[in-house]
Amino acid sequence: MRPFGYVAAADPASAAALVRDRPEAAFLAGGTNLVDLMKLGVTAPGLLVDVTGVLPGRIERAAAGGLRIGAGVRNSDLAADPRVRAEFPMLAQAVLAGASGQLRNMATVGGNLLQRTRCLYFQDVTKPCNKRVPGSGCPARAGDHRNLAILGGSAHCVATHPSDMAVALAALDAVVHVQGAAGPRVITLGQLYRRPGDRPDLETTLERGDLITAVEVPALGYAARSAYRKVRDRASYAFAVTSVAAALDVAGGVVRSARIAVGAVAPLPWRARTAERILAGRPATAEWFGRAADAELAAADPLPDNAFKVPLVRNVVVRMLSELAGIPAGDQAPAGDRT
Ligand SMILES: Cc1cc2nc3c(=O)[nH]c(=O)nc-3n(C[C@H](O)[C@H](O)[C@H](O)COP(=O)(O)OP(=O)(O)OC[C@H]3O[C@@H](n4cnc5c(N)ncnc54)[C@H](O)[C@@H]3O)c2cc1C
Ligand code: SF4
């Protein structure tokens, strides 16, 4: 590993200024992703600016009624918070589905959002990779792509975003508070991530030195009836092959509103807006849940070894929405009143 310096930041503004002004500097939060990548030689910052002492580490009630989660909140504390568990169960379940207890004790909310892809070629410096070395090529397309993207990728990169937490936050319309050069600003989670296009090395819209200080989850009454389902190769301690975060508002057997996001299928947490639009005002039946999933997946462009994800996502979406509506996944009878 390349030798590096370490400094504990004094406050968020000076941390942001330090990274902005020093091209070799990087923020260090829990270090559970960054330090691994340094050991692998994927990244080699000359200075680590430790922000764990200056990032907000509390979860507070937001003025508009949701929750404001400090970027320094550890994943374990987020999942254990009684307000998160009661008001946004999909978020608590998503965080608990990730990594291991020890890792969740270290990992922060900000670092989780900005963790890098687990594409094998990205992590192997002996291989080409457009994301790691722009213009070097993408061996995954003709190589190992079983767990890579079926939506939102490009000819230059089909990596997936690995975070479970970000999938739930996408479904919940979370916004991200950023300390930047021009002062604080707020962006939606959708605005945070970029699609790869011909620049897969640019993963977010953050500028150099932009520090995530908090994530805000707006109030959503029916999110109390929500869930996160993760399909993976092992029962624990594995990244998702596919995951779904969903919340459903049903009255009189009709869907009033739905929130659906899919993970491990795209370079960013994939908000299923097409499916949500189709479901609004439709009968809460497995048939309609399937139609909505099919419409969302019409844009899928899988590679030979990950085409299985298309029916897999469909099945998980139908099953989850059916469970949330209180109907069997194969039963198309209308549900009762459920909110
Ligand atoms: C074995 C293993 C299994 C895992 N399994 C899962 C899993 O199943 N699901 C899952 O979601 N995750 C999983 N993870 C990933 C883990 O959740 C992340 O490593 C962790 O969330 C990153 O948080 P951190 O605070 O340690 O970030 P760091 O490693 O400290 O930082 C990550 C990146 O974010 C930047 N950064 C950190 N904080 C900020 C900030 N506030 N503002 C701007 N930039 C910032 C850093 O500079 C760095 O580039 C796993 C990790 C390991 C090692
Ligand atoms: S899919 Fe993306 S991260 Fe993986 S090898 Fe191709 S360019 Fe690199």
Image (cartoon, grey):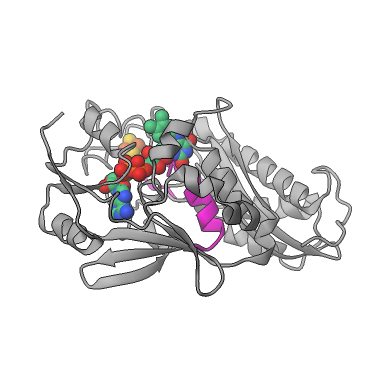
Direction from residue 257 to residue 283 in the image, left or right: right
Residue appearing at x 52%, y 50% in the figure:
167
Residue 160 belongs to magenta span: yes
Q: Which stretch appears magenta?
A: 149-174
Q: Quadrant of the N terminus?
A: top left
Q: Is residue 145 visible?
A: no
Direction from residue 324 to residue 212 in the image, left or right: left
Q: Compare residues 325 and 152 and report the one nearer the observer.
A: 325
- Residue 212 percent location from the top left of the image: 33, 58
- Residue 164 percent location from the top left of the image: 50, 44
Count the labels in the image.
0
Direction from residue 24 to residue 155 in the image, left or right: right
Which image quadrant is residue 142 in? top left
Q: Is residue 57 above or below residue 4?
A: below
Question: Magenta-highlighted stretch: main secondary structure?
Answer: loop
Q: Is residue 138 above or below residue 83?
A: above
Residue appearing at x 86%, y 46% in the figure:
331
Residue appearing at x 83%, y 48% in the figure:
327
Q: Is residue 67 visible?
A: yes
Q: Compare residues 235 and 7 and report the one nearer the observer.
A: 7
- Residue 334 percent location from the top left of the image: 87, 57
Residue 109 belongs to magenta span: no
- Residue 301 percent location from the top left of the image: 50, 45
Residue appearing at x 17%, y 55% in the figure:
19
Task: Please tell me in which quarter of the rendered image ligand 1 is found.
Answer: top left
Q: Quadrant of the C terminus?
A: bottom right
Q: Is residue 124 above or below residue 302?
A: above
